[in-house]
Image (cartoon, rainbow, N blue to C red):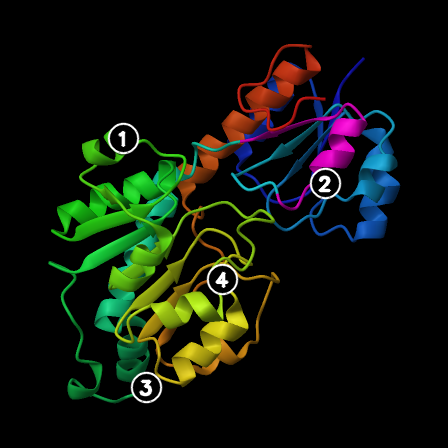
Amino acid sequence: MTARVLVCDPIAEDGIAVLQQFGAQVDVRTGLSPDELEAAVDSYEALIVRSETKITRQVIAAAGRLQVIGRAGIGVDNIDLEAATEKGVVVVNAPTGNIISAAEHAVALMLALARHIPDASASLKSGRWDRKRFMGLEVRGKTLGILGLGQVGSEVARRARGLEMKVIAHDPFVPEERARTLGVELVPFEQLLRESDFLTVHTTLSESTRRLIGEAELREMKPTARLINTARGGIVDEGALDAALREDRLAGAALDVFETEPLTSHPLFSNERVVVTPHLGASTAEAQERVSQDMAEQIIAVIKGEPAQYAVNAP
C-alpha cells in the first residue's frame, strides 16, 4: 500500500523528493484550519509540521491511519505528545539541522542590539543622518550569559568566545567538563541573571520553563543588560519584559519568538530598544534542506517499521 504523507507547513523540496523516491504520495496543504486538518488527517500515515500547525488531541483522535508525526525543527510543544503516545503514533523531530542557523541568528541579534542596527538603518533610509543617536557598545570583554547549553547554546558559546566575550551559562544537565571544553563557566541561575551583560535563551519550552524569565528574574538583571530569545515564546514573560524596558530596568531585548505566533502587533514592537524578527532562527536555505531531508528519512524509517533516529516519544 502506498503511504500518504500530509505536509502541513512549508518545507524544502529536498525532503519531499526523498519521500517521493521512496514511493510515498505527498500532499502539500499548508494553512489548514484546525477543522480542515481534523477532517483531512484520517487519510494519511504521516504528518509533517513546523511550528505553525498545532497537532491537538482532537486531530490525533481523528487520525485512524496515522503512524508518525514529523516536526521539521526542534521544539515539539505544538504537538500533543501524550495523545500521540496513547494512540501509538511516533513523534520525531530534526534537532540537528538548524543548529548553526539558530546560533548565528542569536549572535546576529546580539550585535544588532549592541550597535542599534535596525533603527539606524531605518533612520537613514527615512532621510536622517543621525550618528549621535545610535551610539553603541563593543561586545568584546562583555559577559554573555547562556540559558541552556545544549547544541544551539554551545554553538553560540563558540562564536561568543571568538568575539572575545566572557561566557557563562546555566544548564543543570550539562557536565562541568563539557562546559570547560567550550571555555564556558557554569553558574547558578541567579548568578547568570546578575552577571550577564547579554543574556541569550536556548532552552526548550516545557511546564518547568514556561515564563522562566518573569518579573522577579528581570529585576535581578543589570539595568544595562540586554535579553535575547531565539528559543521559544513563552519562556520569557512578554508583559514583564515590556514593563522592565519601559521602566528602564533593562537596556534592550531582541526576540525571534513569541508566546502567540504569528504576531503582528504588540507593545514591545513600539519600543526602539527592542529588535524583533518573525521566528527566523531556522530560516536559511541550508538549514531547511537539512531539516527536510532528516524528516523524510525518519518518516520512511517509521513506515518501514524501523526505529527513528530522533523519536521524542515511545508509544
First in sequence, mark 2 or 1: give its number.
2
Question: Which three-letter amino acid code belongs to the residue tagged 1?
Answer: Arg
Q: Residue at x 33, y 68 (%)?
A: 221
First in sequence, mark 2 or 3: give its number.
2
Query: Does 191 appear in magenta?
Result: no
Q: Is 125 displayed left or right of 291 in the figure?
A: left
Q: Are marks 4 and 3 in contact (CB under 8 Å)?
A: no
Q: Which residue is mark 1?
A: 178
Q: Which residue is mark 4?
A: 236
Q: Which residue is mark 2?
A: 80
Q: Which residue is mark 3?
A: 126
Secondary structure of the residue carrying tag 2 is loop
- Quote the CA–CA distance across marks 2 and 1: 32 Å
Question: Which three-letter amino acid code belongs to the residue tagged 2?
Answer: Asp
Question: Which three-letter amino acid code belongs to the residue tagged 4?
Answer: Val
Q: Is 64 displayed left or right of 134 in the figure?
A: right
Residue 13 position by quadrant: top right
What range is drawn magenta here? 77-93
Q: Are marks 2 and 4 in contact (CB under 8 Å)?
A: no
| Residue nearer the viewer, 134 or 120 | 134
Residue 124 to residue 25: above or below: below
Query: Picture coordinates of residue 204 (x, y %)?
Result: 50, 45
- Quote the CA–CA distance across marks 4 and 3: 32 Å
- Quote the CA–CA distance across marks 2 and 4: 22 Å
Of the residues tagged 2 and 4, which is closer to the observer? 4
Query: Picture coordinates of residue 79 (x, y %)?
Result: 68, 41
Residue 266 position by quadrant: bottom right
Q: Residue at x 80, y 51 (%)?
A: 34
Secondary structure of the residue carrying tag 4 is loop
Crowd band around label 2 with a 10 angstrom C-alpha radius: few (<14), some (14–19), many (20+): some
Crowd band around label 3 with a 10 angstrom C-alpha radius: few (<14), some (14–19), many (20+): few
- Quote the CA–CA distance across marks 1 and 3: 48 Å
